[in-house]
Amino acid sequence: MTLKEHIDDIQKRLEQKDFSSEAAVRQGIIDRLLNALEWPTFDIKVVFPEYGVDKGNVDYALCHPISTPRVFIEVKRVGNIDKGTEQLFDYAYRIGVTILILTDGEKWRFYHPAGEGSYEDRMVVEVNFIVGNSEESAKYLDRYLNYESVKSGMAAKAIAEDYRNIVSLRQIEERLPEVWSELLQEENEYLLVAMMEKAKDKVGQVPTEEQILNFLKTLSSPPVKKKTIKVPVDRKSHERKNKPPKRLRVKMKNGEIIELEDGIETFVEVIDKIGIERVKELNITRNSIPLISTSKDDEREQHKRGEYYIVSGLSSKNKERTLNLIAEELKIDLTVELVDKE
């Protein structure tokens, strides 16, 4: 069977709900596809199950040379893919693998862990065996997961190249509204000529430059996409686990010092003093999750303050970083520091 034919068959079985547990996904989907991609699934030092990382385990470490991970695969029960991303990236950081895959058998998310930004920013592609094109899905699995490609390093180069292309496209999309706005403001010659030619095609006459300029002035410039500020993950936090705990201390512009027993209480109190709505307008995110929202997320640690929910599952260092970022963006004079707990 070709890889596409394997995926087609898996699709039918997914639709029949044959894979009712994570173990079923591993045996019936992951092992099957790894075998089709020419991995020696019988060799547990190459296809390493439950690979130990610190005090945890990643479901599969695909290795070359033996026992040297190149790819991590974390498997979830069907429909449960949104859990486990942070843990998977933590594993990758400790070991230094070049490709990460999170899958529930139906959806496959491929990540370039060496990229920048949030986990979502570093996702190169997501394929879906149910609604996607099986030929397209097979292409990505073969590109990033083929045994020979992983061994030769071609898979790592491919995902890094695809990631760079995605970043370039994203940057272009973010700047297009700004480009359009400048074209309108500058009364760009090329824009005027293009409109003259198109008008001639449509109505048989060439409008005057004044007519076009008057028309352009009636257009409202497309809104420039609001910047989303992403707080980087504190990747070295695990190195400080055995160090004495720190307390957050913040000195406000008026000299008031906020230093509560609980770091999150201090964090929230400072945001409240600054103005929750002002901070919310900054669109700060933590791992693609809004720092402040008006709706509760049952899967995230949040602190409720009035009608708002503030992400609270942050390390002390990340609280410090976030408050400094808020102060910088709003041009507020704050002194934020971490001090030893007494």
Image (cartoon, helix red, strand yellow):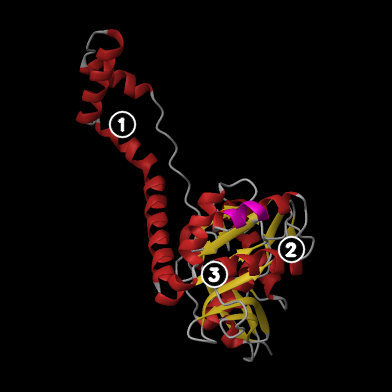
* Nearer the observer, 302 or 159: 159
Side of 318 relative to 214 (left or right): right
Main SS of the magenta part reads helix
- Pick the quarter of the image with the C terminus: bottom right
Secondary element at image label 1: helix
Earlier residue among tags 3 and 2? 2
Task: Provide the residue designation for mark 3.
Answer: 100
- Pick the quarter of the image with the N terminus: bottom right
The local crowd at label 2, few if under 14, some if 14 to 19, many if 20 or more residues have their Cα within 10 Å, is: some
Earlier residue among tags 1 and 3? 3
Cα–Cα span, label 3 and label 2 = 17 Å
Residue 178 lies, in percent from the top left, at 36, 42
Numbered mark located on residue 77 in the image: 2
Q: Say whether residue 7 is magenta.
A: yes
Earlier residue among tags 1 and 2? 2
* Nearer the observer, 35 or 125: 35
Q: Which residues are magenta?
A: 5-10
Q: Which residue is most to the right?
A: 20
Residue at 32 percent across and 40 percent down: it is 179
Q: Which residue is most to the top?
A: 204
Residue at 73 percent across and 49 percent down: it is 15
Residue type at mark 3 is Leu
The local crowd at label 1, few if under 14, some if 14 to 19, many if 20 or more residues have their Cα within 10 Å, is: some
Q: Are marks 1 and 3 in contact (CB under 8 Å)?
A: no
Secondary element at image label 3: strand
Q: Is residue 47 above or below residue 135?
A: below
Task: Provide the residue designation for mark 1.
Answer: 184
* Nearer the observer, 16 or 9: 9
Q: Say whether residue 266 is magenta.
A: no
Q: Looking at the rendering, which quadrant does residue 115 occupy?
A: bottom left
Residue 180 lies, in percent from the top left, at 34, 36
